[in-house]
Image (cartoon, grey):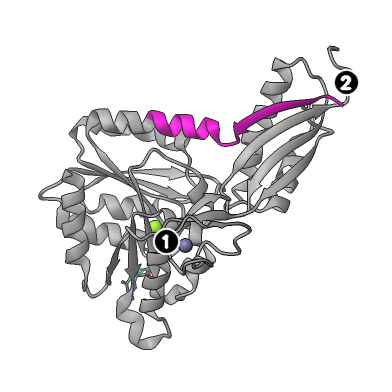
């Protein structure tokens, strides 16, 4: 359950960013999570809900955008989208040399508040 | 509904601390390995077997990560090497902070090599940089030849793969070639050593590589 440590790091950033922008109530936290990161979305949500009490994010829900695994053939340049596995042959030229270009993301994208703009 | 763009890596705090560790290691001229496997694959046994073979030539320190107990550090210390135990008290991985907190226990300037044995787990340690130069994955043949494709992140990131317990191959269905093939696809430049910590077969190649890498 390393998701708990990840949720704690996430919450730390949310609290920092809320303070920086004068936000007192965060209602949504947007995350970009690579399909090929070693993180289980439901475990992350569960962990976040567990630790958000008594913070600016206590009413916040996680909006997790899953970023599919994608790559590029190093021999012919073919772009591979929505790869189901990191091990695939190039559909265009059969090459095995596929460079992964996305899918390991673990980033916070935004925080959302229901407060009026400029308030707080 | 004001949405405030943030765009920050969630693990940036760990990344920063790990980079700090890395800088310290570089300044002290010590190479660092992060040993990762599932529980019982043989990390501590590999350390015991390796340390006795490099002790004459390299000054080595060891950090042992376990959820509980200091047994592994005692096993390693019995080889005459400075070993510090981190008990994570439940956490399934080491992180940069835990490493930075034990560095004072070593005279880094006098070490050639620091080996960190991570908590036994194929998944969790992968996302947490410690400041190491290289990850070493240990896979024992009894775990099955499907593990690299089921847990690809570790096997992709590891610069070295050690396939351990090959003395047990006659008794089980494990296709070594399948492990090699999957790992070569995941990471074409990975060094692979098939060995047995029990019979000693294959250990010399690994030890020779380790000595050369430490000095490189
Ligand atoms: N047959 C055989 N057994 C081995 C070999 N290497 C290790 N073992 C045994 O495997 C068991 C686990 O070894 P450890 O070295 O404690 O494994 P570990 O990866 O350090 O385990 P954790 O720290 O708990 O994750 C022990 O009983 C070892 O004796 C090997 O090459 N062959
Ligand atoms: Mg051990
Ligand atoms: Zn191609």
Residue A82 left/right relative to B207: right
Residue B152: percent from the left, percent from the top?
49, 61
Tag 1's secondary structure? loop
Residue drawn at point x = 87 percent, y = 27 percent: B1
Residue drawn at point x = 41 percent, y = 37 percent: B99
| Residue denoted by label 1 | A97
- Sequence-first disc among 2 and 1: 1
Residue A80 part of the magenta-drawn span: no
Check the residue under mark 1 and report the chain it is in. A
Residue B144 left/right relative to A57: left
- Identify the image quadrant of the C terminus of chain A: top right
Residue drawn at point x = 73 percent, y = 52 percent: A42
Number of numbered callouts drawn: 2
Comparing B163 with A106, the one in front is A106
Residue B107: percent from the left, percent from the top?
24, 31
| Residue denoted by label 2 | A115
Q: Is the C-beta of the residue carrying label 1 under 8 Å from the nearest atom of ligand 3?
A: yes
Residue B165 sits above or below residue A99 on the image? below
Over which residues does the magenta segment extend?
B1-20
Query: How packed is label 1: few (under 14 Cα within 10 Å), some, or many (20 or more)?
Result: some
């Amino acid at each position: 359950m390393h998701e708990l440590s990840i949720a704690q790091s996430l919450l730390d950033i949310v609290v920092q960013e809320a303070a920086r922008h004068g936000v007192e109530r965060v209602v949504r936290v947007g995350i970009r999570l690579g399909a090929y990161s070693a993180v289980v979305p439901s475990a992350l949500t569960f962990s976040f809900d567990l630790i958000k009490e008594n913070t600016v994010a206590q009413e916040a829900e996680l909006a997790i955008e899953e970023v599919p695994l994608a790559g590029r053939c190093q021999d012919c340049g073919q772009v591979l989208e929505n790869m189901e596995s990191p091990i695939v042959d190039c559909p265009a030229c059969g090459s095995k040399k596929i460079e992964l270009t996305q899918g390991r993301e673990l980033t916070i994208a935004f925080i959302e508040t229901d407060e009026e703009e400029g308030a707080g | 509904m004001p949405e405030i763009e943030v765009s920050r890596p969630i693990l940036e705090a760990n990344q920063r601390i790990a980079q700090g560790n890395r800088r310290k290691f570089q300044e002290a001229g010590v190479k660092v390995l992060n040993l990762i496997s599932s529980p019982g694959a043989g990390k501590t046994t590999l350390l015991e077997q390796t340390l006795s073979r490099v002790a004459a030539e390299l000054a080595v320190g060891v950090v042992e990560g376990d959820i509980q107990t200091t047994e592994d550090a005692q096993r390693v210390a019995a080889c005459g090497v400075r070993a510090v135990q981190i008990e994570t008290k439940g956490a399934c991985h080491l992180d940069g902070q835990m490493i930075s907190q034990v560095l004072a226990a070593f005279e880094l300037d006098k070490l050639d090599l620091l080996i960190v044995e991570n908590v036994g787990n194929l998944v969790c340690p992968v996302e947490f940089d410690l400041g190491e130069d290289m990850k070493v994955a240990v896979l024992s043949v009894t775990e099955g030849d499907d593990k690299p494709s089921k847990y690809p992140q570790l096997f992709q990131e590891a610069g070295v793969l050690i396939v351990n317990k090959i003395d047990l191959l006659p008794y089980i269905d494990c296709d070594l070639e399948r492990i090699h093939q999957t790992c070569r696809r995941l990471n074409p430049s990975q060094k692979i050593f098939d060995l047995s910590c029990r019979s000693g077969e294959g250990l010399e190649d690994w030890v020779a590589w380790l000595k050369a890498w430490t000095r490189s």
